[in-house]
Image (tube, coloured by chain):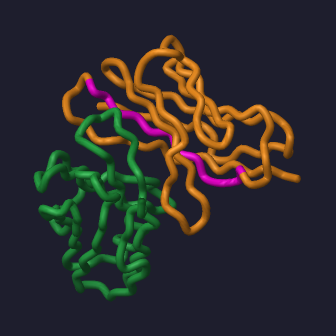
Chain colours: A green, B orange
């Protein structure tokens, strides 16, 4: 099976712009989660989706949004980019909505905001 | 709310020696605990998990972890370290007794195995 794929792998944007990141989960996985990874804050939870429904949302401003499509693919959007949004954005998928399921991570999208 | 702590930012160990990466957690009920590893420029890879049952859990690449409820710990161990084990290790916890909660990660511990 192919793993979790994320596109693009690298992005450079300027302050004030918006960005959309894409994630394709492992085939058959219906749960997708997003995380922001920075050296200072570590891994911080952004969103969790299951069957197109947002099940959980982390403590991020409204500039961060996401969605999941009927084929389980997911996108996240960051509007009005700030320098502090520079980070590695990781997507993870899991088989179902059970909290005991391990998550499988993609390679991430490295976002740099100038 | 659940939380997890990894008290060591960095662990150094000689190749062939046993290694331990520490993790303590805080939840209101019984935890679901996970270990992940991250190699440079890669996403996280799942190593092992504790859900219920035997306190000693065996995972990928020869790693194991012991769940200790009284000490609220879930330390990662390996009997003989390899240079290729050098990576960033994350402990994570979920609290299923608090409803639908997200996976919460520790800050990570960088393991360096020296030849």
Residue that appears at 59% across and 29% down: B58
Relative to B38, say whether B24 is above or below. above
In the rendering, at what x and y percent does residue A30 appear?
A: 23, 51
Looking at the image, residue A93 sits to the left or right of residue B16; the answer is left
In the rendering, at what x and y percent does residue A79 appear?
A: 19, 76
Residue segment shown in magenta: B85-96
Is residue B62 located in the magenta-colored stretch of the structure? no
Residue that appears at 85% across and 44% down: B14
In the rendering, at what x and y percent does residue A8 appear?
A: 37, 80
Is residue B89 located in the magenta-colored stretch of the structure? yes
Residue that lies at the very extreme toward the top in this rendered image: B70
Relative to B85, say whether A62 is above or below. below
Looking at the image, residue A32 sits to the left or right of residue B86; the answer is left
> What quarter of the picture does the N terminus of chain B occupy?
top left
Relative to A62, say whether B71 is above or below. above
Relative to A17, say whether B56 is above or below. above
Looking at the image, residue A47 sits to the left or right of residue B37; the answer is left
Residue A33 lies in quadrant: bottom left
Magenta span main SS: strand
């Amino acid at each position: 099976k192919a793993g979790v794929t994320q596109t693009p792998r690298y992005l450079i944007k300027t302050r004030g712009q918006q960005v959309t990141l894409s994630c394709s989960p492992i085939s058959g996985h219906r749960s997708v989660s997003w995380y922001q990874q920075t050296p200072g804050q570590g891994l911080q939870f952004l969103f969790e989706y299951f069957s197109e429904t947002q099940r959980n949302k982390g403590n991020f401003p409204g500039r961060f949004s996401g969605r999941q499509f009927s084929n389980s693919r997911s996108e996240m959007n960051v509007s009005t980019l700030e320098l502090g949004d520079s980070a590695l954005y990781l997507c993870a998928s899991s088989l179902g909505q059970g909290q005991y399921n391990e998550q499988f991570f993609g390679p991430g999208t490295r976002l740099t905001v100038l | 709310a659940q939380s997890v702590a990894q008290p060591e930012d960095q662990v150094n160990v000689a190749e062939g020696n046993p290694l331990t990466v520490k993790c303590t957690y805080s939840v209101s009920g019984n935890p679901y605990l996970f270990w992940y590893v991250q190699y440079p420029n890669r996403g996280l890879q799942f190593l092992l998990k504790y859900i219920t049952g035997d306190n000693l859990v065996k995972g990928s690449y020869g790693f194991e972890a012991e769940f200790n409820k009284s000490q609220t710990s879930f330390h990662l161990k390996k009997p003989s370290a390899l240079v290729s084990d050098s990576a960033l290790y994350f402990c994570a916890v979920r609290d299923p007794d608090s409803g639908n909660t997200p996976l919460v990660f520790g800050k990570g511990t960088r393991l360096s195995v020296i030849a």
